[in-house]
Image (cartoon, grey):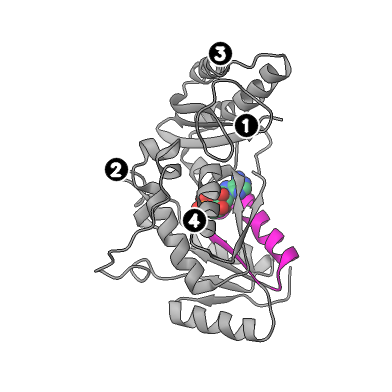
Amino acid sequence: MNNRNTSVVKTKEEMKETVSFLRKAGKSVGFVPTMGYLHAGHLNLVKRAKEMTDVVVVSIYVNLAQFTKGEDFSRYPRDTEKDLIFLEELGTDLVFLPPPDRMYDNDHLTWVSVEKLEDKLCGRSRKGHFRGVATIVLKLLHIVNPDLMFMGEKDYQQVLLLEKMLHDLDMSVKIIRCPTLREEDGLAMSSRNCYLSPTGRRNAAVLYRSLIMAQKMYDNGIYDAATVITGLKKLIEEKEGRIDYIEVVDSKTLEPLPVLQKGCRIALAVFIEGTRLIDNMEIS
Ligand code: AMP
């Protein structure tokens, strides 16, 4: 238990004023944006932020603008009370918890588009998703005004795209990438894992196993991307996974690569029992 008190801030104005006061007092600010229903992967970002900055701000906001039509916005898991207990235990300084209807005005017209990167991988089946992500993150950054923002590599395309946005828009905040935290069987922690039945949950471990298999194939001299992808596809389909995509991509441009090479990324999205799960790994 940490004895520092956590303050919950609900309005943009109060958040801006509080951070401005802290910054004037010479404090550095770390920021962890989330959609709540926190797990150890999120909490690890908070721990990292605490190590690197004086004041840690976590936002919890389920951003409708990044859900595409027919996706799970209304049933996305939410448990703010539990989230606040976790954040308090970690000694989080401020939690930004705007009411659902207070982030966008009714006449909102401005959207941020990170061209090319937003159309690849997850962007193909989730049209408009990254436009929603980039816009909310830019808004949050203007409200929280942090020095550092902490994000997980589990959402690799997201972190890459946001780094590009910060660079292109000359913003001084820096992103600290944090590794993917996994369950014991390797499944990447995700708020959506709670949708899975016990069987689906067991089957879902195949995502990580397939990434490990890709690395093994590379270690054994199999470099042809199509051969590797076919191998992964077979393994995943044996566990009743429906593949959205499996790609071998350049780690900066996300362009598909015909041949595996050190430093490239294997990225995949798979439906298990209708729940879309993503994962990725660097080939080393
Ligand atoms: P979300 O609440 O899903 O929007 O995620 C908020 C942040 O937590 C993002 O930066 C994610 O990349 C990160 N995150 C989610 N799951 C994990 C995980 N298993 N390991 C590390 N970071 C994660």
Q: Is residue 39 left or right of residue 272?
A: right
Question: Which residue was labeled with disc 2?
Answer: 70
Give the image quarter of residue 58: bottom right
For the residue marked with disc 3, what is the amino acid? Answer: Thr
Provide the secondary structure element on which disc 3 rests. helix
Residue 165 image label: 4
Question: Which residue was labeled with disc 3?
Answer: 227
Q: Quadrant of the C terminus?
A: top right
Residue appearing at x 59%, y 15% in the figure:
224
Question: Height in image: 26 above or below 225?
Answer: below
For the residue marked with disc 1, what is the amino acid? Answer: Cys
Select label 3 or label 4 by which is in front.
4
Residue 74 spot, x, y in % from top left: 34, 52
Select label 3 or label 1 by which is in front.
1
Label located before the other in sequence (2 or 1) = 2
* Magenta highlight range: 29-54
Give the image quarter of residue 45: bottom right
Provide the secondary structure element on which disc 4 rests. helix
Q: Dot 1: few (<14), some (14–19), or many (≥20) neighbours within 10 Å?
A: many
Residue appearing at x 45%, y 81% in the figure:
13
Residue 129 in magenta?
no
- Of 241 and 202, nearer the camera is 241
Question: Which residue was labeled with disc 1?
Answer: 264
Residue 44 in magenta?
yes
Provide the secondary structure element on which disc 2 rests. loop
